[in-house]
Image: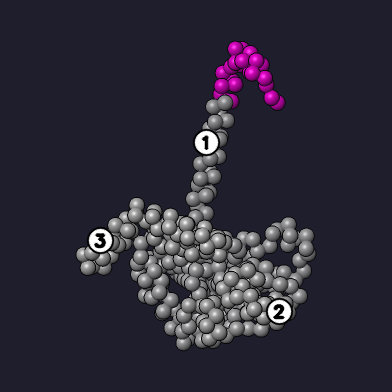
Amino acid sequence: MFLSRQGFSRLLSTNGSSVVRQSIVSSSALIGSHRNLLSTSSSSSRILKESYKNIIVETSPKGGNGKICVIKLNRPKALNALNDDLFSDLVHATKSIDNDENIRCLILMGSTSKAFAAGADISEMKNKTFEQVYKKDMFAEWQEISKLSSTPIIAAISGYCLGGGNELAMMCDIMVCTKNAKFGQPEINLGIIPGAGGTQRLTRIIGKSKSMYMSLTGDFMDANEAYTSGLVAKVYEDYDELIKESIQMANKIASKGPTSLRAAKEAINAADELSLQEGLRLERRLFHSMFATDDQKEGMTAFAEKRPANFK
C-alpha cells in the first residue's frame, strides 16, 4: 500500500501516529540490521576457511618469510582437473588472500608433480547444453583470478598444464615450470575451442602462429619451448626444486614495497589492453604517484644511505 504525502500527514495527526512512528523506527532498525548482516557476510567471505575440499592453503610454507602463501590444487586422482567446486574454493581463497595486507605474494601450484591442472573437468561438462553454458556465462567466474589487484601470483607448474589449466596459469603474473612440464590447448580434440583465455592470452604471449598451431592441432609445448617462447620465466629441474625456488622468488617479491608492487602489476597488466601511448601515460601517472608513498621515501632513502630498504 502507498500513501500520498497528504494521507501520510493525516495519519500522523491521528491517534495512530505512534503506531506509524513505531513502524518507521522498526523499519529503520530492520534496515540497519540488514546492512550489518550484509557487512558481516561480506567480511566473513573475505576470511580464509580453515580448510577447503579441493585446494590446500599453506599460509606459513616452509622457507617462507611470513609474507607469502601457497595454494595447491588438490584433485590428484583427476590430475587436478578444474571443476566448479574447485574454482569456487580457489576464488574464495585467492580473494581472501588478496585482502590480507600481511600477504605480499602467492604461489599457485598442483599438489602432485604429475600435473598443475590437466584441464577442465570433462565429466562435468559433457552433457551440458548451449542454453545452460550461455545462461551461466561459463568460465566467467574463472576470470576473477586475473582481477586480483594487490597480490602478485606465481604459477609453479610441474607436469601437465593443459586446456583450462594453462588458461588458469596464464591468469597469474609469473609462470615457472619444471623440465617435465607440458603445455597445451587440446580442446580441438573434444570438438570445442578454448573458453577461458586460450585464444586470447596465449596469442598475446607467444604470438599468432604458435598459438594457432597449438589450438588447431592440439599438440603440446614442452618446457624448453615454453621458455624460449616467453610463456614461462624460469625452468627448474624437478618438483622439489620448483617448490624451493618458487618460495625464494616469492620471498624476494614479498620483501618489496606493497604499493609499488601493486602499481607495477597494474601497469604491466594494462599493456595488453591499452595502446602504446595510453600505456605510457598510465605508467607515468603511476610512477608520479609513487612519490606520495612510504615505499618511495624508504627505497630512495635506503639507497642514499647505502643500506637495504625496509619496506613496511
Identify which residue, 46 or 51, lies in the foreground. Answer: 46
Image quarter hosting the C terminus: bottom left
Determine the main secondary structure of the stretch shown in magenta.
Answer: helix
Q: Position of residue 226 (x, y in %)?
A: 55, 81
The disc label shown at residue 108, or none: none
Q: Disc 1 designates what residue?
A: 32
Q: Is residue 160 magenta?
A: no
285 relative to 221 in the view: left or right = left
Q: Disc 3 designates what residue?
A: 301
29 shown above or below 41: above
Q: Disc 2 designates what residue?
A: 216
Q: Position of residue 149 (x, y in %)?
A: 49, 59
Q: Identify the mark nearer the N-term, 2 or 1.
A: 1
Residue 32 in view here: yes
Identify which residue, 48 or 64, lies in the foreground. Answer: 64
Mark 2 vs mark 1, CA separation in Å: 56 Å
Image: magenta residue range:
1-23
Q: Residues within 10 Å of mark 1 (few under 14, many from 20)?
A: few
188 shown above or below 128: below
Instruction: Give the residue type that dot 1 points to.
Output: Gly
146 relative to 124 in the view: left or right = left
The residue at 60%/12% (across/down) is 13
Instruction: Give the residue type that dot 2 points to.
Output: Leu
The residue at 76%/66% (across/down) is 128
